[in-house]
Image (tube, rainbow, N blue to C red):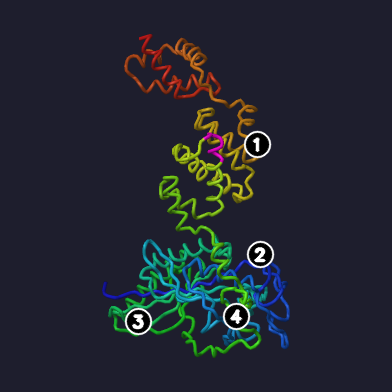
């Protein structure tokens, strides 16, 4: 390529804590009434003093460890000074030269994206712009919420890599249960730093694109900005170091302001907060704010590891594995069902029944997922227990019910939480596999449909499906269609 594209990301995520970062106000992102969860501390009233939320520190350290970061022995908070209407104190408590973590990485499709730092700060308020009015309003509910910021090295080269990094990070945050990271609700926000250079290894003029609130916006903004900067360089124009916004409707970036440098913020240590010790907890040293070693030992299985294990254990298609992994609760439910299948089948290893694993994934990701979406509920609120779902899969595999009956059974289980065996019995949906009973019905259908029978014997094999349908209707849909087909073919050959 004529130009080298260099991209770095700055990603903010609101942390899941009961209270705000430096006060006891409720941290509730769902609150719709403005200026309810506020107090003198988060509004920056004179004389008010902040107190560090230890749970927020723990969640940042947890994220940093999951992303292979180094945890220093000391950290501190700093004041980042700038004026904006939604910043009540006139400064933001953040971290500058001694953050909670440094030098990590995240692998995206075998490419290692280095992480410069992950630090902790407080969120700002929210500006509200009433349509058609000549003024703006400020909602301070968000002000002071714990906000984690992750900064990458400029290791990203394409819009696809930028999007993949954001998607994988969101997944990790959810697996760690440190943030909901819902971009539509501004719980995760992304900023892209991008530059183009004609000389390999040399950085061009950096342009920042602020407040991207969807993966599509991240990819679209990068693609647009690459083209914009390329056109400027081709025409020998200068690229201005600036902050730009993203217009979703026009699918283009637009200038906002000249980009600030770190010196513009006049950082200095936060005088109202003590330095943080992150040293290992020992009998001699008990002043560490969190137990880093314990957090490390309690890390859950992360998405990349789970993908690899699912492939190794369950041999599912990559598309099914990725769909399961994207939703941790769905993946957990799937594994609970698989565990229950062992009980139902009286086996030690589920690998003995690989087709049933695929059947489980298929019904979970299609039929059950469809019911969850239509009814707008999560798998956590589903009335079907993993035990009942395993029994349901076993009944299908053992041909106790047909595929059409299975949908009826699953819907009833979903609505009522009933046991599948009870649903089948109450609705008389059990599939008939008894050959003697089916032979009687087949013979009756052959007698009543002499013309189609003759057509079949003359070579019109498509008539067979018509006869199968007649048998199914006569059995009120309970006959096993595979068994019916076999009996029909045998019977018709004998009578020809």
What x and y, as percent, mark residue 45? 71, 85
How far is mark 4 from mark 2, CA to CA? Answer: 31 Å
Residue furthest to the left: 2
**Front in this rendered view, residue 151 or 77:** 77
User: Helix, strand or loop at disc 1?
Assistant: loop
**Front in this rendered view, residue 214 or 224:** 214
Residue beneath label 1, please? 418
* Of callouts 4 and 1, the N-terminal one: 4
The 10 Å Cα crowd at callout 4, few under 14, some 14 to 19, many 20 or more, is many
- In this view, the mark in front (3 or 1): 1
The 10 Å Cα crowd at callout 3, few under 14, some 14 to 19, many 20 or more, is some
Residue beneath label 4, please? 276
**Front in this rendered view, residue 436 or 216:** 436
The image quadrant of residue 339 is top right
Disc 4, disc 1: CB below 8 Å? no
What x and y, as percent, mark residue 119? 54, 76
* Of callouts 1 and 2, the N-terminal one: 2
* Of callouts 3 and 1, the N-terminal one: 3
> In the image, is residue 321 above or below residue 261?
above
The 10 Å Cα crowd at callout 1, few under 14, some 14 to 19, many 20 or more, is some
Q: Is residue 477 visible?
A: no
Q: Which residues are magenta?
A: 340-346
* Of callouts 3 and 4, the N-terminal one: 3
How far is mark 4 from mark 1, CA to CA? Answer: 54 Å
**Front in this rendered view, residue 114 or 47:** 114
Q: Residue sitting at 57 percent across and 39 percent down?
A: 389
Residue beneath label 3, please? 204
How far is mark 3 from mark 1, CA to CA? Answer: 63 Å
The main secondary structure of the magenta stretch is: helix
How far is mark 1 from mark 2, CA to CA? Answer: 33 Å
Mark seen at residue 30: 2
């Amino acid at each position: 390529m004529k130009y080298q594209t260099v991209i770095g990301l700055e990603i903010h995520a609101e942390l899941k804590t009961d209270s705000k970062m430096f006060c006891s106000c409720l941290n509730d992102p769902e609150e719709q009434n403005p200026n309810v969860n506020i107090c003198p501390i988060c509004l920056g009233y004179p004389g008010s003093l902040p107190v560090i939320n230890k749970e927020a520190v723990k969640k940042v350290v947890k994220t940093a460890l999951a992303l292979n970061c180094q945890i220093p022995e000391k950290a501190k908070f700093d004041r980042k000074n700038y004026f904006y209407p939604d910043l009540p104190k006139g400064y933001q408590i953040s971290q500058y030269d001694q953050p909670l973590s440094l030098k990590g990485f995240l692998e995206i499709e075998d490419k290692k994206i280095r992480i410069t730092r992950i630090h902790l700060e407080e969120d700002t308020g929210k500006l509200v712009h009433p349509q058609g009015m000549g003024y703006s309003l400020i909602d301070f509910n968000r002000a002071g919420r714990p906000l984690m910021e992750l900064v990458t090295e400029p290791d990203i080269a394409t819009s696809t890599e930028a999007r993949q990094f954001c998607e994988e990070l969101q997944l990790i945050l959810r697996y760690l249960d440190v943030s909901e990271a819902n971009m539509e609700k501004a719980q995760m926000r992304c900023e892209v730093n991008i530059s183009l250079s004609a000389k390999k290894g040399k950085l061009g003029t950096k342009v920042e694109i602020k407040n991207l609130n969807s993966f599509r916006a991240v990819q679209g903004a990068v693609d647009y900005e690459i083209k914009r900067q390329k056109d400027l360089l081709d025409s020998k124009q200068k690229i201005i170091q600036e902050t730009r916004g993203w217009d979703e409707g026009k699918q283009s970036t637009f200038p906002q302001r000249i980009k600030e440098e770190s010196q513009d913020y006049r950082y200095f240590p936060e005088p109202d907060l003590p330095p943080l010790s992150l040293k290992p907890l020992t009998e001699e040293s008990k002043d560490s704010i969190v137990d880093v070693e314990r957090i490390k030992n309690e890390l859950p299985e992360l998405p990349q590891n789970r993908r690899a294990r699912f492939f190794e254990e369950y041999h599912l298609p990559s598309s099914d594995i990725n769909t399961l992994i994207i939703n941790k609760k769905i993946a957990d439910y799937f594994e609970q069902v698989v565990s229950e299948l062992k009980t139902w089948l009286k086996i030690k290893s589920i690998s003995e029944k690989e087709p049933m694993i695929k059947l489980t994934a298929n019904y979970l990701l299609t039929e059950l997922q469809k019911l969850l979406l239509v009814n707008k509920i999560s798998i956590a609120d589903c009335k079907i227990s993993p035990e009942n779902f395993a029994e349901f899969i076993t009944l299908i595999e053992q041909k106790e019910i047909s595929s059409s009956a299975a949908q009826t059974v699953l819907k009833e289980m979903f609505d009522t939480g009933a046991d599948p065996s009870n649903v089948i019995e109450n609705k008389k949906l059990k599939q008939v596999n008894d050959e003697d009973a089916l032979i009687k019905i087949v013979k009756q259908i052959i007698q009543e449909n002499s013309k189609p029978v003759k057509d079949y014997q003359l070579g019109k094999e498509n008539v067979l499906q018509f006869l199968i349908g007649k048998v199914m209707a006569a059995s009120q849909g309970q006959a096993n269609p595979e068994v019916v087909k076999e009996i029909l073919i045998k019977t018709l050959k004998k009578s020809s």
